Image (spheres, grey):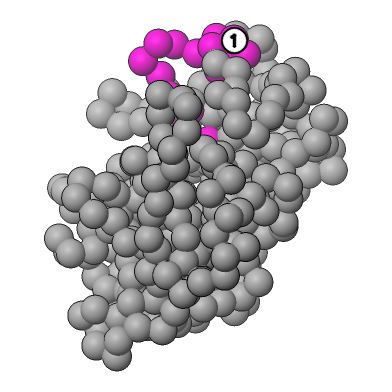
Amino acid sequence: MANTHSDLLIFLQSGVVYKLPVHQVPKTGRDTLGTPILNLIPIEKNDKIASVLSVYSFEEEGDIDLMFCSYKGLVKRTPLRAYQNIRKNGLIAYGKSNEDHLFTVVKSKDGQDALISTSKGMSIRFPVDSIRRTGRSARGVKGISLRDDDSIASIVVVDQDSTRLMLSITQNGFGKRTSLENYRSQHRGGKGVIDIVTSRGNGDVVGALIVEDEDRVIMITNKGQVIRIPVKNIRITNRNTKGVTLMKVEGKEQIVAVAKVVEETEETEELVEGEVVEGANSEENPLVSEESQEQQQTNSDQNSLEVESANTENQDQENKDQENKDPVVQE
């Protein structure tokens, strides 16, 4: 979330950071493509955005650190104020190696824990204080030991006494909620514990989010399909399970991104909601929700797919679903 008085810190996979005032970002409609990032910052052709953070005031957020995590599990912690004065041509924020690059950046404070999840279903939790503060160009220290076929899926920062839940979602639409109390704090650099069982059936982990009952989660597939489901109806299980079905995907379709929506906005109200229903008692096929997709007939060259709940038979809702087109997720 940001307002016109905030600054955006745009971190690239190459380790460079740019500062962009929010008021310089053109305001457009929900169904537009947006402005190419090349028109806003001088990004290299082969570079990609790793993370975008909003900062309202560097003075008011003076006690905040930025935690960096690379694809190979290296982490480092640098004070936020070190990135207050950024030149127009960018600033080195992370000293990556040739074999590794920046995965993401999150805000942290003393007394919190970092929780790293991998694509193969492992997770490690360790105190943020165990990582000493370093300069901007530092590369960091090992946060988690990865297998050769594994990579980082997400990193979140939580309070040490937090009783919230972690939601893990896989490529093939499986997911589960687990209490943070089941993830014991340990020394950084270890292999961690099993967060979710991954297999050919449920796929690799796409992301992990810290959620509460009133939250809603949006999932996006590589075919452009979007579904939003309430978190409170997702089953709470232990760590070492494969999860339950949150979204039906077929063929080569896979979930590629997940996001949490806390507050209702005009944009999110127009998204199609998928209702979660109870499934079978079997752990092999416990369905939580089923969504059918309906192809709209329009005059444009491209058709949009929309997801409607199998349990929703209300005709007014179906008419609303048919009117929505090309839903765009905005956080």
Residue at x-position 20% and y-position 80%:
284
- Check disc 1 and report its element: helix, strand or loop: helix
> Which region is colored magenta?
37-51
How far across and how far down the image is residue 327, in percent? Answer: 55, 42
Looking at the rendered structure, the kind of residue marked 1 is Asn
Residue at x-position 34% and y-position 40%:
223
How far across and how far down the image is residue 97, in percent? Answer: 32, 27
* Quarter of the picture holding the C terminus: top right
**Of 69 and 220, which appears nearest the observer?**
220
**Of 150 and 23, which appears nearest the observer?**
23
Residue at x-position 72% and y-position 19%:
26
How far across and how far down the image is residue 88, in percent? Answer: 66, 10
Local crowd at mark 1 within 10 Å, few (<14), some, or many (≥20)?
A: few
The residue beneath circle 1 is: 39
Looking at the image, can residue 157 be seen?
A: no
Prevailing secondary structure class for the magenta stretch in the rendered image: loop
* Direction bottom: furthest residue: 281
Count of marks overlaid on the render: 1
**Of 116 and 228, which appears nearest the observer?**
228
Residue 1 position by quadrant: top right
Q: Is residue 326 above or below residue 292?
A: above
Residue at x-position 30% and y-position 42%:
72
Q: Is residue 89 above or below residue 287?
A: above
Residue 323 relative to residue 139: left or right: right
Residue 293 relative to residue 49: left or right: left
How far across and how far down the image is residue 323, in percent? Answer: 58, 45
Q: Is residue 287 above or below residue 71?
A: below
